[in-house]
């Protein structure tokens, strides 16, 4: 399977990851809300809004992956698709860090460890090895992934609030 087909694993894994979060977030919040930092408490939303936010983020990942699938090597579409993948890795690190910090399971940590870390790392390496993205653009994708993570989450929350 070529990278242009394999890159579709990223949104598929996001769907699986979001399902894990969807199934476990409500119970987690009810047990651990007081343990969370103030920033996360401010991000709290209803189950319905959380579900809508997950759908919005998933649709965005599918659109960015599609852009990459039709983009030329090292083009803006490919950069954004790999940035999506980098964002998933960054999100995985956040889930793992939260579980360590809280000393307990956090929603999304299982898929982060067993799916995101190995598969997304492989996809980014594969994109590089097949010449779809340069080392320089991989670095940019991680910088963009870090810079975009909070705004994307806030935008998804805002859209979920007005829907």
Image (spheres, rainbow, N blue to C red):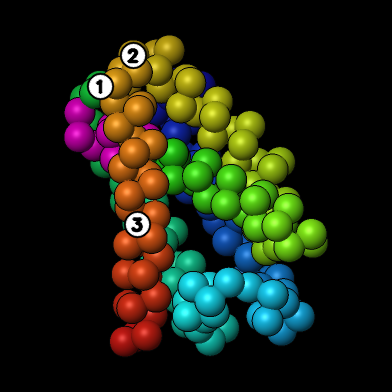
Q: Where is residue 100 in the image (x, y as percent from the top left)?
A: 73, 53
In the displayed structure, does residue 130 sit left or right of residue 123?
A: left
* Quadrant in the picture for residue 59: bottom left
Precedes in sequence: disc 3 or disc 2: 3
Dot 3: what SS?
A: helix
Q: In this view, does 155 lie to the left or right of 40?
A: left
Q: How far apart are marks 2 and 1 (CA)?
A: 7 Å
Query: Residue 21 location, x and y as percent?
Result: 63, 65
Main secondary structure type of the part rendered in magenta: helix
Residue 59 visible in the current orientation: no
- The residue depicted at 67 percent of the width and 49 percent of the height is 96
Q: How would you rate the neighbour count of disc 3 (Cα within 10 Å): few for under 14, some for 14-19, many for 20 or more?
A: some
Query: Which residue is the site of mark 1?
Result: 73
Going from N to C along the chain, the mark reached first, 1 or 3, is 3
Q: Please report contact status of discs 1 and 3: CB closer than 8 Å, yes or no.
A: no
- Residue at image point 54% right, 29% down: 121
Real-space Cα separation, disc 1 to disc 3, in angstroms: 21 Å
Locate the C terminus and report the quarter of the image it occupies: bottom left
Disc 3 designates what residue? Answer: 60
Q: To which quarter of the image does residue 103 belong?
A: bottom right
- Does the stretch in magenta take in 64? no
- Residue at the spot x=66%, y=80% of the render? 33
Provide the residue span drawn in magenta: 75-82
On the image, the x and y values in percent for residue 16 come to 61, 54
Q: What residue do we see at 29% from left, 21% from top?
A: 136
Q: Residue 74 in the image: x percent, y percent?
A: 24, 23
Left or right: 27, with 121 as reference point: right
Q: Mark 2 near mark 1, Cβ–Cβ under 8 Å?
A: yes
Total numbered circles: 3
Res. 131 mark: 2
């Amino acid at each position: 399977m070529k990278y242009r087909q394999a890159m579709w694993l990223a949104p598929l894994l996001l769907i699986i990851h979001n399902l894990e979060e969807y199934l476990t977030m409500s119970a987690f919040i009810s047990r651990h809300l007081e343990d969370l930092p103030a920033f996360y408490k401010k991000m709290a939303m209803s189950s319905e809004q959380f579900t809508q936010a997950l759908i919005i983020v998933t649709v965005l990942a599918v659109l960015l992956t599609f852009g990459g699938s039709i983009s030329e090597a090292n083009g803006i579409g490919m950069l954004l698709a790999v940035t999506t993948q980098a964002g998933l890795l960054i999100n995985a690190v956040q889930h793992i860090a939260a579980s360590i910090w809280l000393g307990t399971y956090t929603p999304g940590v299982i898929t982060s460890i067993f799916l995101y870390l190995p598969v997304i790392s492989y996809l980014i390496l594969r994109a590089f090895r097949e010449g779809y993205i340069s080392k320089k653009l991989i670095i940019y994708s991680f910088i963009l992934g870090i810079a975009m993570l909070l705004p994307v989450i806030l935008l998804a929350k805002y859209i979920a609030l007005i829907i």
